[in-house]
Image (cartoon, grey):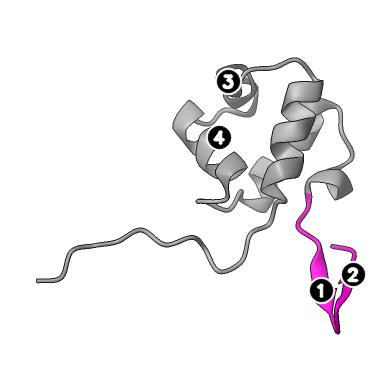
């Protein structure tokens, strides 16, 4: 039986670096933000590292906890080499 390997999700709802930046700017630890959002610290770390995609509901909660517009945290789509919102 082949060993199970972990792969990153194909599509992320969030921009991982933006989530980490906004959290740090707000002066929160991963644990503190996770507590505010109602998720585990491990899941918060996976969202920030890009190993897991935040659900749309959790991304809204993260934005609210950080007092940050959700558009800052959302993954940008690329169409023909240009960034497209949402």
The quadrant holding residue 63 is: top right
Residue 73, position as x, y percentages in the image: 79, 45
**Left or right, 43 with reference to 70:** left
Q: Which residue occupies the extreme front position in the image?
A: 81
Quadrant of the frame with the N terminus: bottom left
Q: In the image shown, does 52 or 7 lie closer to the viewer?
A: 7
Residue 61, position as x, y percentages in the image: 71, 35
Q: Look at mark 4 in the image and give the residue it sits on.
A: 44
Dot in front, 2 or 3:
2
Q: CA distance from mark 2 to mark 4?
A: 26 Å
Q: In the image shown, does 22 or 13 lie closer to the viewer?
A: 22
Q: Which mark is residue 53?
A: none
Residue at the (84%, 80%) spot, across then down: 79
Q: Residues within 10 Å of mark 4 (few under 14, many from 20)?
A: many
Q: Earlier in the sequence, mark 2 or mark 1?
A: 1
Asked if disc 2 and disc 3 are in contact, CB closer than 8 Å, the reply is no
Q: Secondary structure at mark 1?
A: strand
Q: Look at mark 3 in the image and give the residue it sits on.
A: 35
Dot in front, 3 or 1:
1
Q: CA distance from mark 2 to mark 3?
A: 32 Å
Residue at the (68%, 57%) spot, across then down: 13
Q: CA distance from mark 3 to mark 1?
A: 33 Å
Q: Which mark is residue 84?
A: 2
**Left or right, 70 with reference to 46:** right
Q: Secondary structure at mark 2?
A: strand
Image vertical order of residue 82 relative to residue 32, above or below: below
In the image, the segment drawn in magenta is: 74-86
Quadrant of the frame with the C terminus: bottom right
């Amino acid at each position: 039986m082949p060993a199970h390997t972990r792969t990153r999700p194909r599509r992320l709802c969030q921009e991982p670096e933006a989530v980490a930046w906004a959290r740090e700017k707000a002066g929160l630890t991963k644990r503190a933000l996770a507590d505010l959002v109602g998720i585990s610290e491990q899941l918060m770390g996976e969202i920030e590292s890009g190993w897991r995609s935040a659900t749309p509901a959790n991304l809204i909660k993260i934005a609210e906890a950080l007092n940050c517009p959700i558009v800052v945290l959302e993954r940008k789509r690329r169409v023909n080499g240009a960034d497209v919102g949402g």
